[in-house]
Image (spheres, grey):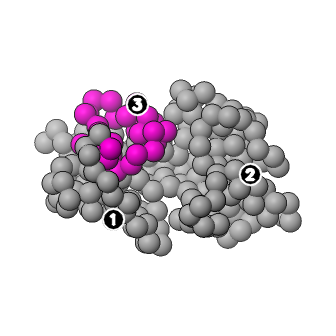
């Protein structure tokens, strides 16, 4: 199966849970494509990526879309999590912006949503993971990527303060991969 990403962190998280399948990144398959994520839901973007890669390769494909939804900002940045300040901004710049925006509010609650989609040319199988937490008042931790350094778990640690193994036990992508794994077992063993 192809995992429609070249993000090493995402790939590692997905491979560690879907370990009974042979999974390859786009790079490992020699595919250079950047699917435009222009749908207005995580599920829409994940399905679009899975279908475009499948149509190109005719190989089973897994794709995801995920993002940070902040309650005080009416779910923003949502599907724009990686792009809301523009394509050339860094994770650190986006995180600084969000921390500064949330300094205007008492409510710092947020959730990370991940939709992980399998597509084989006939059916879509969807795994979903939702992780609840809050946005920290400062960046903390050096592990992870994206908004991990500002997403605060109920245990008081940010995702970036967890080891990769600890993060993979609790992340929204991990929850989505575990959900997808259960559903794939039912479908692929028929």
Residue 188, compared with residue 90, is above or below; it is above
User: Looking at the rendering, in which quadrant would you find the N terminus?
Assistant: top left
| SS state under label 1 | helix
What number is the disc on residue 135?
2
Specify whether residue 36 is painted magenta. no
Residue at 63 percent across and 34 percent down: it is 143
Q: CA distance from mark 1 to mark 2?
A: 29 Å
Residue 166, compared with residue 90, is above or below; it is above
Q: Position of residue 171 (x, y in %)?
A: 55, 41
Task: Looking at the image, tell me whether mark 1 or mark 2 is earlier in sequence order.
Answer: 1
Residue at 26 percent across and 61 percent down: it is 51
Q: Residues within 10 Å of mark 2 (few under 14, many from 20)?
A: many
Q: Is residue 43 left or right of residue 159?
A: left
Q: Which residues are magenta?
A: 1-27
Q: Which residue is mark 1?
A: 48
| SS state under label 2 | strand
Contact between marks 3 and 1 (CB within 8 A): the answer is no
Quadrant location of residue 74? bottom right
Residue at 61 percent across and 57 percent down: it is 68
Q: Residues within 10 Å of mark 3 (few under 14, many from 20)?
A: few
| SS state under label 3 | helix
Q: Is residue 184 visible?
A: no
Residue at 76 percent across and 44 percent down: it is 139
What number is the disc on residue 16?
3
Task: Looking at the image, tell me whether mark 3 or mark 2 is earlier in sequence order.
Answer: 3
Q: Position of residue 152 (x, y in %)?
A: 72, 43
């Amino acid at each position: 199966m192809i995992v429609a990403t070249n993000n090493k962190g995402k790939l590692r998280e997905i491979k560690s849970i879907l370990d009974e399948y042979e999974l390859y990144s786009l790079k490992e398959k020699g595919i250079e494509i950047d699917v435009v994520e222009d749908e207005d839901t995580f599920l829409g973007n994940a399905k679009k990526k899975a279908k475009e890669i499948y149509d190109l390769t005719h190989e089973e494909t897994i794709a995801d879309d995920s993002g940070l939804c902040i309650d005080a900002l009416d779910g923003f940045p949502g599907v724009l999590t990686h792009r809301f300040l523009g394509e050339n901004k860094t994770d650190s710049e986006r995180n600084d912006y969000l921390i500064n925006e949330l300094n205007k509010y008492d409510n710092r609650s947020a959730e990370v949503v991940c939709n992980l989609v399998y597509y084989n040319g006939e059916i879509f199988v969807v795994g979903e993971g939702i992780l609840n937490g809050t946005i920290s008042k400062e960046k903390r931790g050096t592990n992870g990527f994206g908004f991990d350094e500002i997403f605060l778990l109920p245990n008081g640690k940010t995702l970036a303060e967890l080891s990769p193994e600890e993060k993979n036990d609790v992340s929204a992508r991990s929850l989505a991969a575990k959900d997808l794994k259960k559903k794939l077992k039912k479908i692929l063993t028929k």
